[in-house]
Amino acid sequence: MKKNLQTAFSQRQHMLSKDFEIYYYTDSHAYHVDSHAHTHFEFYFFLEGSVSIHIHGKEYFLKCGDIILIPPGIAHYASLLGSGAPYRRFVFWVSQKYFDELAFISPDYLYLIQHVRQTEEYIFHYDMLAFKALQAKIFQLIEESHSERFGKEAKVALCVSDLILHLNRTIYESKHPKTPHEEQALYQNLLQYIEAHLDENLSLELLAKEFYVSKYHIAHVFKDNLGISVHQFITKKRLLLCRDALPGSTSIGDTCLMCGFRDYSSFFRAFKKEFGMSPKEYREIYSREDYFPKNQQ
């Protein structure tokens, strides 16, 4: 997994940067680190290994998808319990000063650290769908930090604030689940919105912005109600729209575009898989005058 972005492990426990630092570690053997506390916030994203972490005198056994937030002044250390698998994790350090600056933009950036301080709940678990999406954001930040592209500093700052806000949003939503009535209302509103905008660019990201919920929450709503993904649902609705429009005089290519498909080859494959024939074959069969009974003409 992107080995060129890995960092050689260091036992240093203080920040060199005044704002934030991020590391991707993979170790095959244990490094002994004594119990310690930071003056900064530490986000720890566990990927793989047989590991427990001791926080404030309690031991927690970790599994892939665990996210840990350790505030300043909280004693902690990790223990490698076995050497059967590599010990892989991301470590993200953020200074109190940087959080203070984010607080001027929005108090939403502080929800998670306030929650941890009030409840002493340090560990949160993401399912694999949500964790993979989180990893993508982390890798984008690491890749940008290693790049020399124009606008690097501005892009890195955007990636950091996006990652922190994402963590706050997903944890907040997990702690404040919607009621069944609210969930059903959201589901129905999503269906109506998609139906009305099939010819436009639709994505999980766009729907999340439109309805002010996370894209992972929307994905779960569709899985729970239909058993398929949002993308699969949108594709099926567009295919039905195309099927009904094909007997008309508009070209097949234009029909495909009018129904929201941007790539004809993808449309062709999806149509044939769904209906067992090509769009051209469908048009030839269902456009024939003798196909329809006389009492329906």
Image (tube, rainbow, N blue to C red):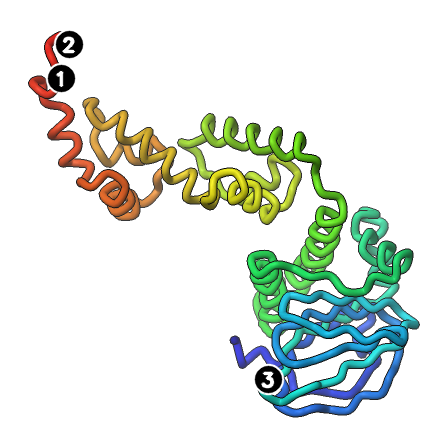
Residue 109 got which mark?
Answer: none
Per the image, label 3 sits on a secondary structure element best described as: loop
x, y percent for residue 139 = 59, 68
The quadrant in which residue 250 appears is top left
Per the image, label 1 sits on a secondary structure element best described as: loop
Q: What residue would you read off at disc 2? A: 297
Q: What residue would you read off at disc 3? A: 86
C-alpha distance separating marks 2 and 3: 70 Å
Return the disc, 1 or 3, that comes first in the chain's sequence: 3
Residues marked 2 and 3 touching at CB (< 8 Å): no
x, y percent for residue 21 = 74, 72
Residue 130 vs residue 152, the one in the foreground:
130
Return the disc, 2 or 1, that comes first in the chain's sequence: 1
x, y percent for residue 7 = 64, 82
Q: What residue would you read off at disc 1? A: 292
C-alpha distance separating marks 1 and 3: 66 Å
Q: Residue at x 36, y 34 (%)?
A: 238
